[in-house]
């Protein structure tokens, strides 16, 4: 819960509730029982809902009965979503949308799209989530549903916050809050204030966010909303820890833990434990911090990737501080594997999006080709007609044949030129897709996949030419502290600035790429470890003499370097450089360590 991503975990679960105040449908006794059971035993509630839905035939239901069925399906989807059973939640949300569309009720259909979008958002599929949310927004605009439209604004804000765009999220949350205040709906006001406070940390600062959370807590108390009060306390706990007010945070965090545990929401429980781990760590109570991190990891692992990533990072740093380096190494390996999986998912989504664009371009080209072929066929028919007419007059045949041949040649030439131009455009689109797939979207450096591919080419060249080849793996020291203190936006600016430093201090023939998170890999052809160490010293000197410019002001940072010569396989050399880099970390950071002799330059 210490990063913007982890704040979003609490943010999303507090907000993603039904669009309409739709408890007006007539419910059977089974549905009433399911409603009362859903908070404490979602499996039992699901069984009751299945029983209530079992005998319903959509083809024979009246309009008001269709709305009843839609409400049941909505509750069924929400139960699965709350238990992180996303595949089943998506299936039930899709059934909800079918029933809503059959009913002809536009707000109900928008609600179904909204629910489907929440399922996508909670799995980190932000592009798909935005597609559902904007579709729901279009259904609602101009039909007099301000409360429901406000929740769509809010959902879009949440999704932008997930993507790290705090300022855009801030704008959408303000739009949602404005609608809720006009409706005088305290429940929605509290909800949107809560979300606004989470991005206000990045936009206005932590004190402004705390003031908003206090307003949320007051409103939740007035409404008797225990879950809202618990979440507000959890967020206040997080923000107090973020600004270093640890004594103030301790009682708030303790109460938040007790209240959130009573609610039983897995993601909330994992998030508040992570924050309390950060609190203990800030107080120097490392064993207690480690215990809380492990409790959080047990809840978040395989369920909430963003929390899992932050907890593993915190655990690794605590284990290093405790001197338990073997455990720290194991934890870091888990962290790297998780980050690689998350990056692969992001790359897969990007490639899928690019593939769709390519298919659209190709489809457009195919349509144009069909049009040209039809035009050519029409021309051929016209020529045959001309030949029939020309049989009547020999001279006219000759003239028409000559004219037809000339026109045919011109049309054919034009068609061939058009087809060649379209083929070139398709080839260029494919080249653009290939280049984008090789680049890290944040820094513009090569990504991991490209580094592996090009690095293997350098290994092959080394074997052929019997030349030197060395790899340098470097990691930003205390990078998590930058994110915690200034936010992920500033963290991204630091990574982009460091990428520029690397480009400016390495040769054109050197390969440099983002290896993962705040790790960068350099492959240096024609360089032995001594020359590689000189390159590392140049980079280090550049960072010592020049601060990185960010929106939070100039920031200075240090790096830990690991250097290894390539004598066989590239992955073995990278592993050796990685081990050397972690020796640099364990030795106090801001150091250059070579794998060949373990020597380091401080």
Image (spheres, rainbow, N blue to C red):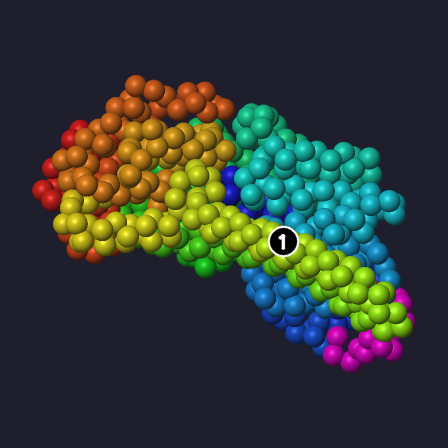
- Tell me the residue at 35%/24% (across/down): 556
SS state under label 1:
helix
Front one among 119 and 580: 580
- Tell me the residue at 78%/59% (across/down): 403
- Tell me the residue at 31%/45% (across/down): 316
Q: Residue 92, percent across and down?
A: 68, 67
Residue 514 lies, with reference to residue 334, above or below; the image says: above
Residue 189 is left or right of residue 506, and the answer is: right
- The outermost residue toward the left is 597
- Tell me the residue at 61%/45% (across/down): 159
Residue 236 is left or right of residue 32, and the answer is: left
Q: What residue sits right under mark 1 in the picture?
A: 417
Give the magenta part as a residue range: 53-68
Q: Is residue 144 visible?
A: yes
| Magenta-drawn stretch contains 161 | no
The quadrant where residue 25 appears: bottom right
| Magenta-drawn stretch contains 57 | yes
Residue 236 is left or right of residue 533, and the answer is: right
Secondary structure mostly seen in the magenta stretch: helix
Q: Is residue 27 visible?
A: no
How many numbered callouts? 1
Front one among 341 and 116: 341
């Amino acid at each position: 819960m210490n990063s913007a991503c982890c704040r979003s975990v609490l943010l999303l679960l507090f907000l993603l509730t039904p669009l309409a105040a739709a408890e007006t449908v007539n419910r059977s006794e089974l549905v009433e029982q399911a409603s009362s059971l859903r908070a404490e035993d979602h499996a039992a509630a699901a069984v009751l809902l299945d029983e209530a839905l079992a005998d319903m035939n959509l083809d024979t239901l009246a309009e008001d009965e269709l709305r009843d069925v839609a409400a049941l399906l909505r509750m069924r989807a929400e139960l699965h979503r709350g238990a992180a059973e996303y595949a089943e939640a998506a299936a039930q949300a899709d059934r909800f949308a079918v029933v809503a569309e059959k009913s002809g009720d536009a707000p109900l259909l928008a609600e179904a799209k909204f629910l489907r979008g929440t399922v996508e958002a909670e799995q980190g599929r932000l592009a798909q989530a935005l597609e559902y949310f904007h579709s729901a927004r279009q259904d609602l605009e101009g039909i007099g549903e301000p409360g429901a439209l406000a929740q769509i604004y809010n959902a879009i804000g949440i999704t932008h916050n997930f993507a790290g765009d705090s300022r855009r999220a801030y704008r959408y949350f303000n739009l949602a809050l404005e609608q809720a205040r006009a409706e005088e709906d305290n429940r929605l006001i509290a909800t949107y204030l809560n979300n606004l406070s989470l991005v206000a940390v990045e936009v206005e600062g932590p004190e402004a966010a705390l003031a908003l959370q206090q307003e949320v807590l007051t409103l939740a108390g007035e409404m008797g909303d225990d879950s809202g009060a618990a979440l507000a306390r959890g967020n206040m706990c997080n923000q107090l820890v973020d600004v270093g007010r640890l004594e103030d945070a301790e009682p708030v965090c303790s109460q938040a833990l007790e209240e959130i545990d009573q609610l039983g929401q897995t993601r909330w429980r994992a998030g508040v434990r992570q924050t309390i781990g950060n609190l203990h760590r800030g107080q120097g109570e490392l064993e207690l911090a480690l215990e809380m991190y492990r409790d959080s990891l047990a809840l978040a692992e395989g369920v909430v990737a963003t929390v899992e990533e932050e907890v593993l990072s915190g655990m690794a740093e605590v284990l290093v501080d405790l001197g338990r380096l073997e455990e720290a190494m194991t934890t870091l390996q888990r962290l790297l594997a998780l980050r690689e999986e998350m990056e692969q998912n992001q790359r897969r989504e990007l490639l899928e999006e690019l593939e769709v664009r390519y298919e659209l371009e190709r489809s457009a080209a195919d349509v144009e080709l069909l049009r040209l072929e039809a035009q050519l066929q029409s021309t051929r028919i016209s020529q045959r007609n001309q030949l029939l007419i020309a049989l009547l007059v020999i001279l006219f045949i000759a003239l028409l044949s000559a004219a037809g041949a000339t026109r045919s040649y011109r049309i054919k030439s034009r068609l061939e030129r058009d087809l060649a131009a379209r083929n070139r455009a398709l080839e260029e689109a494919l080249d653009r897709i290939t280049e984008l797939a090789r680049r890290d979207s944040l820094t513009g450096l090569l990504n991991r996949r490209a580094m592996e591919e090009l690095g293997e080419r350098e290994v092959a060249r080394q074997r052929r030419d019997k030349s030197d080849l060395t790899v340098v793996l470097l990691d930003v020291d205390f990078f998590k502290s930058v994110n915690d203190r200034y936010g992920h936006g500033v963290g991204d600016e630091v990574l982009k600035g460091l990428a520029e430093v690397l480009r400016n201090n390495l040769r054109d023939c050197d390969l440099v790429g983002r290896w993962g998170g705040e790790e960068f890999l350099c492959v240096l052809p024609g360089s032995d470890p001594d020359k590689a160490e000189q390159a590392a010293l140049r980079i280090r000197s550049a960072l010592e003499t020049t601060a990185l410019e960010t929106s939070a002001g100039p920031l200075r940072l240090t790096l830990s370097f690991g250097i290894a010569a390539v004598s066989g396989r590239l992955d073995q050399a990278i592993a050796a450089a990685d081990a050397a880099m972690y020796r640099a970390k364990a030795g106090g950071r801001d150091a250059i360590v070579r794998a060949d002799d373990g020597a380091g330059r401080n």
